[in-house]
Image: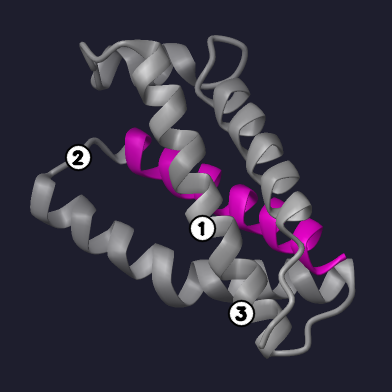
Amino acid sequence: MLNIDLLTVVVASIIGLIFGYLWYSPLFFGNVVKKIYFTSRKKSVVILLSFLLLLVVSYFIAFLEIYLKVTSFWDGVVTGILLWIGFILPIQIIDFFLEKKKLVLFFVNISFLLILFIILSGILAG
């Protein structure tokens, strides 16, 4: 049985949520994304759903890192990069071509996901 530190999973998810809020705020890329992509959903629903999904992602990264015996922050960073290259990037590229998204939105999103996976994997391994 794997012993996953649930407190670390929650903390990593909160940090990921804050990072996402900042990334897509007018401080960084919010104005660029807002011009291209508009959602009429309530912010509170989006934030709650994002947090719940970040909990799932964080839990499974922690599970994988324990299984792979990843124990240092930097090994976690490498794990996050490899997860992004192997799973996130290919899916995002397919999504880009199938949905004909704007190139700038594609780069904003994949950059966000790369940094997010580095942050989550680093925290959860450390």
Classify mark 1: residues with Cα within 10 Å, few (<14), some (14-19) or many (20+). some
Which tag, 1 or 2, sits closer to the chain's start? 1
Which residue, given by chain and number where applicable, does mark 2 sit on? 101
Query: Who is closer to the viewer here, 29 or 11?
Result: 11
Q: Earlier in the sequence, mark 3 or mark 2?
A: 3
Q: Position of residue 78 (x, y in %)?
A: 72, 74
Residue in the picture at 21% in, 11% down: 40
> Of label 1 and label 3, which has the lower sequence position?
1
Q: Is residue 11 above or below residue 126?
A: above
Residue located 56% across and 31% down the image: 20
Q: Position of residue 66 (x, y in %)?
A: 72, 82
In the image, which disc is placed on residue 57?
Answer: 1
Residue nearer the viewer, 72 or 48:
48
Q: Is residue 88 left or right of residue 55?
A: left
At 62% from the left and 22% from the top, the residue drawn is: 22
* Crowding near the residue tagged with mark 2, few <14, some 14–19, many ≥20 C-alpha atoms within 10 Å: few
- Residue 40, placed above or below residue 51: above
- Measuring from the top left, give residue 54's x and y in whole percent: 52, 46
Give residue 123's quadrant in the image. bottom right
The residue stretch that appears in magenta = 104-126
Give residue 69's quadrant in the image: bottom right
Q: Amino acid at mark 3?
A: Leu
**C-alpha span from label 1 to label 2:** 24 Å
Question: How many numbered discs?
Answer: 3
Query: Eyeballing the image, is 15 above or below 117?
Result: above
Q: Residue at x 39, y 13 (%)?
A: 43
Label 1: element kind: helix
> Which mark identifies residue 64?
3
> Which type of secondary structure does the marked residue at label 2 adopt?
loop
